[in-house]
Amino acid sequence: MPQHRDQAAHLLPTPCGRCGVDDVPRLVSMPPGSVHAIRAECAHCGRFVRWLPKPKGDEERAAQHEKARKYGPATTQQMALLERLGYDGPPPMSIQEASDLIQQLLAKKE
Ligand SMILES: [Zn+2]
């Protein structure tokens, strides 16, 4: 995977304490839900070298942002705006829903 190659670039070749081979550790992904995301181990004998944190790529950040938009609660600014627009229906359950309501109310005003 590409992010593994990127991380490998930051790892310097380290002489293995068991087999003595001086090489860049091999990176092994841990199953989802594990405490550690990636295990660095000797590429030759598999001796544990160190744990590496999960890479936080742009893709992941975008996914989190998208999730917040869909499932996060509406912001106080959105609620205030809805109130100012005269909205009196049930409170929106998400940022996306609040945004849609604001759009509808603004459209009605025109
Ligand atoms: Zn080794």
Image (spheres, rainbow, N blue to C red):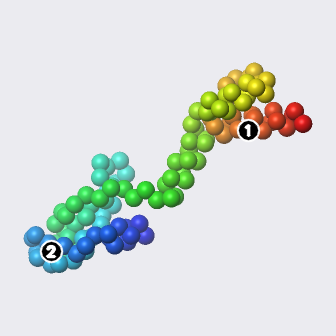
Amino acid under disc 1: Asp
Callout 1 secondary element: helix
Q: Can residue 36 be seen at all in this image of the molecule? A: yes
| Residue 100 image offset from top left, x and y in percent | 73, 38
Q: Residue placed at 69% from the left, 27% from the top?
A: 80
Q: Residue furthest right?
A: 110
Q: Residue placed at 61% from the left, 41% from the top?
A: 70
Location of mark 1 (residue): 100
Picture quarter with the C terminus: top right
Q: Can you say whether 35 is above or below 84 in the image? A: below
Splitting the image into 4 quarters, where does residue 56 fall? bottom left
Q: Can you say whether 15 is above or below 50 in the image? A: below
| Residue 82 image offset from top left, x and y in percent | 73, 28
Q: Nearer the viewer, residue 110 or 67?
A: 110
Specify few, some or many for label 1: CA neighbours under 10 Å numbering under 14, 14-19, or 20 or more.
few
Amino acid under disc 2: Pro
The reply to whether discs 2 and 1 touch (Cβ–Cβ < 8 Å) is no
Picture quarter with the N terminus: bottom left
Q: Earlier in the sequence, mark 2 or mark 1?
A: 2
Q: Can you say whether 31 is above or below 95 in the image? A: below
Callout 2 secondary element: strand
The label on residue 15 is 2
| Residue 48 image offset from top left, x and y in percent | 18, 63
